[in-house]
Image: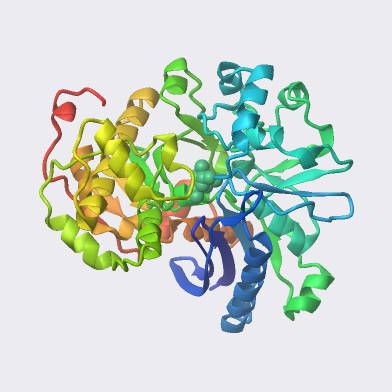
Amino acid sequence: ETGIALAAVDLGASSGRVMLGRITPGVLELTEVHRFRNGPVALPDGLYWDVLGLYQDALVGLRAAARRAPELAGVAIDSWAVDYGLVDASGRLSGNPFHYRDARTAAGVAATHERVDFAELYGISGLQFLPFTTLYQFAADVSLGRPDTQALLIPDLLGYWLTGVRVAEQTNASTTGLLDARTGDWSTSLIDRLGLPAGLLPDVVPPGTVLGGLTPAVVAETGLTRPLTVSTVGSHDTASAVLGVPAADADFGYISCGTWGLVGVELEAPVLTEAGRTANFTNERGVDGTVRYLRNVMGLWLLSESLRTWGLQGVDVSLPDVLARAAELPAGGPQFDPDDPVFLPPGDMPARIADACRSAGERAPDGIPAMVRCILDSLATAFAAGIERAAALSGRDVTTVHVVGGGSQNELLCQLVADACGRPVVAGPVEATALGNLLVQARTHGVLSGDRWALREHLRTGLTTRTYPPRRVPSSRVAGIGR
Ligand code: LFR
């Protein structure tokens, strides 16, 4: 029997990990070999990522994977979307990559829409409006005008450092606002109209492209002397997460729930309607040319920033304890709109949430368990609305809702989502993104074959998920109207 050992470097906005996958037909064994923190670094002039630290941690994780599995044959990288580093012809990184939560992009939005308005942008890229989409960042980036500058999205930047090869992996390229949703290639006319340099972006390649081996410098630095193939996967973490949804049929909705909640359906072709644009639905590229028709909901960022705020105030909150207490509170408490842009930047979420509840005419949550419950109730409502809208706008039947990612471990949240959706929620896997990464790699290496359904069938073998039946069917579903 032919098996293989592969490493997935998966960088989330609040943590990164390197996962070792051992794959033979019928078996997928996943081991976490390195986990590390990630988050915005606030400097006087803005919010940044510590991209060099992330690269170091990726190397530490690769070494750990190779120690566990000396036969390690390959690695692929995925991360959050949108953000990039600029490199010149010699490979020098000009400046540290900005964090998408940095405030400078507001100016870029206005400047971009002056040249091409949002409706027209939507008609080309099919992307929802998010103030931090790459094209707005480009419009606010003063380093762009340097000669020979190329922008590499975060996974492509790390891939370049490992191999010396520059590409733009397609699923992540689709989050820049510059990819044509129909062709899956750069919209050169849009790039031109926005006044961006012609050579700014490298060629688009699909998931499953071999970049090559480690450069001699990386081999010398890491001691990884056995040949290791670096290839592309769905390098946008959400693309890999959606591949990692253990569905057997097309009639599913998904919530990839981590820092963000990405809520939608998987389609074969983009939906570029005005109704979809008004509802702020996005058409991002998935693995194998699929479309991730979804919207961004603020996600567990609200909870993690609240915990951070309480910590700064000297209140140490144990998450399991507070979730248990939040679960005991009765339904029908205050709610707010989690997608209000006031929640985008880091800061005092409990104060912002209390304000939002009050201005919505509700009482502010009283105490920490009530605040946590308020966050989860509000997210569940927004998730359910997202699923309902995705189904209505795309015409796709949704009978089951899959929750994958870190949020799938939150029992209270999963139950509230099932209740709000009036549909069963299937929770897990937690590491859907790393699994989606490994499935594509295994296919690239010839150990697995077939389309996404075949890959998911492989994923389901030996996987444990938990199903949450809805405790009640919301009246809006009984009446058959979306919210
Ligand atoms: C989730 C995610 C979302 C993207 C956001 C910012 O990790 O990749 O899909 O909208 O981060 O990049």
Figure quadrant of residue 387: top left
Going 43% across and 57% down the picture, which residue do you hit? 432
Give the percent coordinates (x, y) of residue 162. 74, 64
Residue 125 vs 1, above or below: the answer is above
Give the percent coordinates (x, y) of residue 145. 83, 37
Q: Describe residue 68's horizontal placement relative to residue 398 as left or right.
A: right
Give the percent coordinates (x, y) of residue 59. 66, 72
Q: Is residue 336 visible?
A: no
Going 54% across and 62% down the picture, which residue do you hit? 38
Image quadrant for the C terminus?
top left
197 vs 77, nearest the viewer = 197
Give the percent coordinates (x, y) of residue 153. 67, 48
Residue 480 vs 234, above or below: the answer is above
Residue 220 vs 249, above or below: the answer is below
434 vs 149, nearest the viewer = 149
Going 66% across and 31% down the picture, which residue do you hit? 178
Q: Is residue 222 visible?
A: yes
